[in-house]
Amino acid sequence: MRNSFLFTSESVSEGHPDKVADQISDAIVDLFLSKDPEARVACETLTTTQLVVLAGEIRGEGVYEGGEWAPGALEEIEATVRATVKEIGYEQSGFHWESFRFENNLHGQSEHIAQGVDESAEKDEGAGDQGIMFGYASDETPDLMPATLDYAHKILERMAADRKAGIAPFLEPDAKSQVTLRYANERPVEATAIVVSTQHAPGYYWHKGEGDEALYTELRKYVLGVIADILPAELLTANTVYHINPTGRFEIGGPDGDAGLTGRKIIVDTYGGAAPHGGGAFSGKDPTKVDRSAAYITRYLAKNIVAAGLARRCTIQLSYAIGVAEPLSIYVDLHGTAADGVTEAAIEQAIPQLVKLTPKGIRTHLGLNKPIYRQTAAYGHFGRQASGDAFPWERTDLTDKLKAALAG
């Protein structure tokens, strides 16, 4: 590891068009799981000006079974989509929760996929697809997340809360943030640059002499106050550079400003570039899909390893084949930060003794067959609290067992 370097992560708000799509897809996952914990969902969403389109494969009692929609299911799906957009806050002429055009192209799950995944008397439930999944943890923050991403998320999360509470009525739903930190001896020591671009009410911009300077000053002062509240004071120095709406006017945003698709913000969803990503998106997928569930269990394991003091940083990789229950490989990298006597090989041997890493084993261990996914789809899937309680993959209840296994 270099002694000194700059690192940057970005986040996008719940009103970003891609995140609108993610939240809609996960709202559909929750709808199905609320009626059938064993439901199968792979829901993709497209958003653009006054249009939302769903596509994908589904199966679930009470919604879609035997190749037919349950009575009222189509209406409930549309109501769920509109309620999600309303909660985000879109009531604009170019994208309004009540008036956008809606298309539902969901269809039944492929029998050829189902035969490899479903549990039977002859075999365990298999993985829903092949793939590689990564989990990561670092002791940079109390949430054991990369500091750059942690702060970028929290800036936007705070702004959304203030917008909805009426504290910052000039804000609109679409926004982006970016945080660059200087590291010394693997620790963040200074914020060198912070970028916030937020959609705003008419007039709140100032660029190259255009716009209302007084209104822009009000918006800028508010954003700088949020940054000062979120980042530790010692990181904000006289050298920190701030870029607040650097291009000027940002009144047209969200799906009206740019099309949105499910699964296009996977680095925002995970570790902000501080760790590898297997390539699979999470949103819109039920927990039989290892793209989602195995990424959650690897985060859970990595976080518990760091929380147990076995290392200061940890990356874990799992790999799967479609229709096969057990992972094909387990890989652990402690990045040279292992505690005395701790080795990657020892942890690799201990993990499968503590957690069953089949798709069903993961779902059982973490309790994933529940409608908990809509709230994951903005501000990151990791390092966050959900409705006051940690997501199950954020628990640190494995630390004692890990230490005991390594001691043994």
Image (cartoon, grey):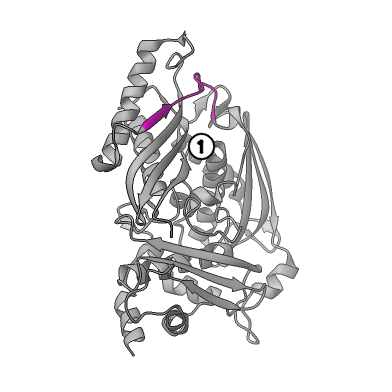
Category of crowding for the residue at label 1, using alpha-carbon neighbours closer than 10 angstroms: few (below 14), some (14–19), many (at least 20): many
Camera-side residue: 5 or 39?
A: 5
- Determine whether the residue tagged by mark 1 lies in a helix, strand or loop: helix
Residue indicated by mark 1: 85
Q: Is residue 132 magenta?
A: no
Please give the range of residues in magenta.
241-253
User: Which residue is painted at 37% across and 62% down in the image?
Assistant: 394
Res 133 seen here? yes
Examine the image and state in which quarter residue 236 appears: top left
Q: Is residue 249 magenta?
A: yes
Rendered location of residue 35, percent (x, y): 51, 60
Rendered location of residue 85, percent (x, y): 51, 37
Q: Is residue 80 above or below residue 362?
A: above
User: Which residue is painted at 25% across and 42% down in the image?
Assistant: 234
Task: Give the residue at the far left of this rendering.
Answer: 233
Task: Give the residue at the far right of this rendering.
Answer: 112
User: Which residue is painted at 71% across and 60% down in the image?
Assistant: 67
Q: Which quadrant does the C terminus fall into?
A: bottom left
